[in-house]
Image: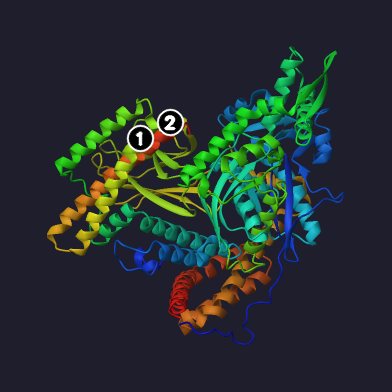
């Protein structure tokens, strides 16, 4: 059994310092920021006490407006006011066309097959930078409420977001100057909120219908472990579609034949959205709309509305059934259903969900706030404010990942719904004699044919020694990290020729573009770019220093020889000195040196941790056995 | 990485086909509580990377031991037989005939009046087959004569066949349900 460890005087870990962390729900319609203060998670309101920030960004020649004021301008200035930008995030021009008239913007394709930019009076803007504007406002709100610069943020994404959409979200956060602690799936965040705040246990289904996306996740909650059993969804289905259904109904009913202009379309959609909201607590509502020289007034009853959205609701129920199937569970085995997202306020949605699961859905935590609250709770743990020893979050990969093989088929390497992080490797071979290069095409999706899946990246492995067909052995490894982000590497086994890429989506930005945009953005023009780089290195260096000194104090004597300890302390001293010199390059060099010097120690600590975890379990088992004997 | 490479050792289990899934699950969770990237999110970048590699390996180990077929394949691998490298195709002809018949049944089932019920029947038949092969494998392992090794390999290969067919049935079911 391990002995109790006592730190040497003066060597005890640094006194606990409270860090500033927030959870951000970057939504299609509204966004929120929440944090944990004096032990409880709460949404941070703006100065007018408004908790929801409309996810609307208006570009003007003289600057950017975000939120309520931008939303109000959507009708008068539709082309420069971007709403529901989340629907465009990580998508290509072809995807955007699928939305058709729903997105009344002027799109430009800057490079073939690249992401769509929107033309505004302030120039062409990408969905990533529009999202970054929303994040900046939330980060500022969080920083002001906490009284300092943020140390980190957890940002939520729909569980069914694909690789490109996740990357794009992370890029937007970087652009907004946020340190992303984790991308957290929205339904999982909601489960964390219910699990930690309401001590919910058992198997739960999270039904998350937002403005533009739908997710369902099935989780087992038990003693602080949040295990996602399956997730399914539709990233192009949400409350926005209810609005469109009402708008189309009105167009038909009032016999509107001419094409509406951008301003009229925007007006019609806002009208439809209001009607939808009224129908949540009223039996009927009236819509008055004017266009061109004409106007109309129509009444919509709840019954009619229910019929309009029935096909959409049915679609969500089908997705729920698929999630149940993937989790290998029957509907009776679900203990509770949690409702998330503003669109679950629609009565017909609630009754349909209740009917499917045979249980009254839970709405104890506000469906608009629950995701941000869960994200704040996790951010608080990840940043190190709370030990988090009892909490374990096991999430899954939502969509299968694979590579193209002969005949336009997809060979799956990582199936959907496996626990992340995960790494899987598979061997492939050449098909021609003397073949020296191999093209690797990375795909995401459930279908068998390449054309039906989403293309994530293409890269080539060169330098394969010429051999007869089928003799070369190329090991392709897929790795998905805890944020659900993929990296792929390929290696020829006999020569060790290697090629690695972090998959960068076709519809995103590359690193240079991001750095360039950060430099260009007005916020940073005032700061010195060098200064910022130095600060980043200092933060990284301090983190490494703290982790190595703490580790030395805790386990140094046990896991390292005297000599190894002395060597490591030597490197620690060097990094400390470098940190005092205010030179980014020197600090970077010492970070590398200390990192190299401590990597063996880090691995030994990890191994020791595993042993201790097993020993603890053996002890638990022993106690249970004793109890049984007593 | 210096973690114990043997998955059974990793979770503190005896190296055998019959394992207690509940203690495997609890060992898995206890270990992930220390290795998971969430526990290292505020550590240095290098430590974060290390934790991701450990956690990925542990997830893979857990998956391997949880699934009976993967566990059996892994046990063979530990005794020096890598099925992925084994290309020999000499299988029990009777078994192969059965498989061909099943495949034909599957083809017919798709076009039946009530394809779901037909697929259900095939699915439960496959499940029974899988269970009986598992029993066979279990007894063969206990009876560890060198002569039975070849037979052991054949049983695992049969399990692979069945698993492939099960996968096919699932795919058809999903197609029917239009997922």
For the residue labelled by badge 1, is the local secondary structure a helix, a strand or a loop?
A: helix
Residue B42, given in percent of the width and then of the height, sits at: 61, 64
Q: CA distance from mark 2 to mark 1?
A: 10 Å
> Where residue A238 appears, x then y in whole percent?
65, 35
Contact, CB < 8 Å: mark 2 with mark 1?
yes
**Quarter where residue A286 is shown:** top right
**Residue that appears at 62% across and 37% down:** A352
Q: Which mark is residue B119?
A: 1
Residue occupying the point 46% across, 62% down = B54
Q: Which chain hosts label 2?
A: B
**Residue occupying the far right of the picture:** A48
Q: Residues within 10 Å of mark 1 (few under 14, many from 20)?
A: many
- Using the rendered image, report if marks 2 and 1 lie on a common chain: yes
Q: Which residue is mark 2?
A: B176
Residue furthest out toward the left: B147
* Residue A104 can be seen, yes or no: no
| Quadrant, the N terminus of chain A | bottom left
Give the label on residue A222, or none.
none
Which quadrant holds residue B61?
bottom left
Front-most of residues A381 and A467: A381
**Way the structure is coloured:** rainbow
SS under mark 2? helix
Question: Percent x, y for residue A424?
Answer: 40, 51
Residue A200 locus on image (x, y percent): 62, 58
Sequence-earlier tag: 2 or 1: 1
């Amino acid at each position: 059994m391990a002995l109790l460890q006592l730190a040497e005087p003066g060597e005890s870990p640094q006194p606990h310092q409270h860090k500033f962390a927030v959870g951000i729900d970057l939504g299609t319609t509204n966004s929120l920021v929440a944090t944990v203060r004096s032990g409880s998670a709460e949404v941070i309101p703006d100065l007018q006490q408004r908790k929801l920030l409309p996810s609307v960004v208006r570009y003007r020649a003289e600057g950017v407006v975000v939120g309520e004021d931008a939303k109000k301008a959507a009708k008068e200035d539709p082309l420069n006011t971007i709403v529901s930008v989340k629907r465009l995030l990580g998508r290509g021009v072809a995807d955007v066309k699928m939305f058709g008239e729903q997105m009344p913007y002027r799109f430009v394709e800057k490079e073939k097959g690249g992401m769509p930019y929107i033309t505004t009076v302030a120039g062409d803007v990408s969905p990533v930078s529009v999202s970054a504007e929303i994040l900046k406002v939330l980060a500022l709100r969080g920083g002001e409420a906490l009284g300092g610069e943020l140390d980190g943020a957890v940002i939520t994404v729909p569980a069914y977001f694909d690789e490109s959409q996740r990357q794009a979200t992370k890029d937007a956060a970087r652009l907004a100057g946020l340190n992303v602690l984790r991308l957290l799936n929205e339904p999982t965040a909601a489960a964390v909120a219910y699990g930690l705040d309401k001590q919910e246990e058992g198997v739960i289904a999270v039904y998350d219908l937002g403005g533009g996306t739908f997710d369902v996740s099935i989780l087992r909650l038990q003693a602080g472990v949040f295990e996602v059993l399956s997730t399914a969804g539709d990233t192009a289905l949400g409350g926005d579609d209810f609005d469109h259904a009402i708008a189309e109904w009105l167009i038909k009913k009032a016999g509107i034949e001419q094409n509406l202009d951008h301003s009229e379309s925007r007006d019609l959609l806002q009208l439809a959205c209001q009607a939808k909201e009224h129908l949540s607590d009223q039996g009927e509502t009236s819509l008055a709309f004017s266009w061109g020289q004409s106007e109309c007034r129509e009444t919509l009853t709840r019954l009619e509305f229910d019929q309009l959205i029935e096909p959409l609701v049915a679609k969500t129920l089908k997705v729920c059934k698929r999630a149940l199937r993937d989790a290998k569970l029957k509907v009776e085995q679900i203990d509770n259903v949690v409702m998330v997202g503003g669109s679950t306020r629609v009565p017909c949605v609630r009754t349909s969900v209740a009917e499917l699961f045979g249980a009254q859905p839970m709405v104890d935590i506000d469906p608009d706030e629950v995701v941000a609250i869960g994200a704040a709770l996790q951010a608080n743990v990840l940043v190190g404010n709370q030990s988090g020893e009892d909490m374990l979050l096991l999430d899954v990969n939502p969509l299968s990942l694979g590579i193209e093989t002969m005949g336009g088929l997809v060979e799956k390497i990582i199936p959907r719904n496996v626990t992340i992080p995960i790494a899987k490797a598979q061997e492939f071979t050449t098909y021609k004699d003397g073949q020296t290069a191999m093209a690797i095409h990375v795909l995401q999706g459930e279908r068998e044919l390449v054309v039906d899946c989403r293309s994530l990246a293409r890269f080539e492995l060169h330098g394969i020694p010429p051999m007869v067909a089928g003799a070369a052995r190329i090991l392709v490894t897929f790795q998905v990290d805890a944020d659900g982000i993929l990296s792929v590497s390929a290696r020829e086994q006999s020569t060790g020729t290697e090629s690695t890429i972090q998959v960068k989506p076709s519809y995103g930005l590359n690193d240079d573009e991001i750095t360039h945009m950060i430099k260009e953005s007005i916020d940073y023009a005032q700061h010195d770019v060098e200064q910022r780089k130095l600060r980043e290195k200092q933060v990284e260096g301090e983190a490494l220093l703290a982790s190595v000194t703490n580790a030395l104090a805790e386990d140094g004597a046990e896991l390292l020889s005297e000599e190894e300890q002395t060597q490591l302390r030597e490197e620690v001293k060097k990094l400390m000195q470098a940190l005092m010199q205010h030179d980014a390059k020197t600090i970077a060099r010492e970070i590398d040196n200390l990192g190299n010097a401590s990597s063996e120690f880090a691995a030994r600590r990890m191994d020791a941790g595993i042993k201790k975890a097993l020993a603890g379990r053996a002890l638990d088992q022993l106690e249970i056995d004793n109890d049984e004997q007593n | 990485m210096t973690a114990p490479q043997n998955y059974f050792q990793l979770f503190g289990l005896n190296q055998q086909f019959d394992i207690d899934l509940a203690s495997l699950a609890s060992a898995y969770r206890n270990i992930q509580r220390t290795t998971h990237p969430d526990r290292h999110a505020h550590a240095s970048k290098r430590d974060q990377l290390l934790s991701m590699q450990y956690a990925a390996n542990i997830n893979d180990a857990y998956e391997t031991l949880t699934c009976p077929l993967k566990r059996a394949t892994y046990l063979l691998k530990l005794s020096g037989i890598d099925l992925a490298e084994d290309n020999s195709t000499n299988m029990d002809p009777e078994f192969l005939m059965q498989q061909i018949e099943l495949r034909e049944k599957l083809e017919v089932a798709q076009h039946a009046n009530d394809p779901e019920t037909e697929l259900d029947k095939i699915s439960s038949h496959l499940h029974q087959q899988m269970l009986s092969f598992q029993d066979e494998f279990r007894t063969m392992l206990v009876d560890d004569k060198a002569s039975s090794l070849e037979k052991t390999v054949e049983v695992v290969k049969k399990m692979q066949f069945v698993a492939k067919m099960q996968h096919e049935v699932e795919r058809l079911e999903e197609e029917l349900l239009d997922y």
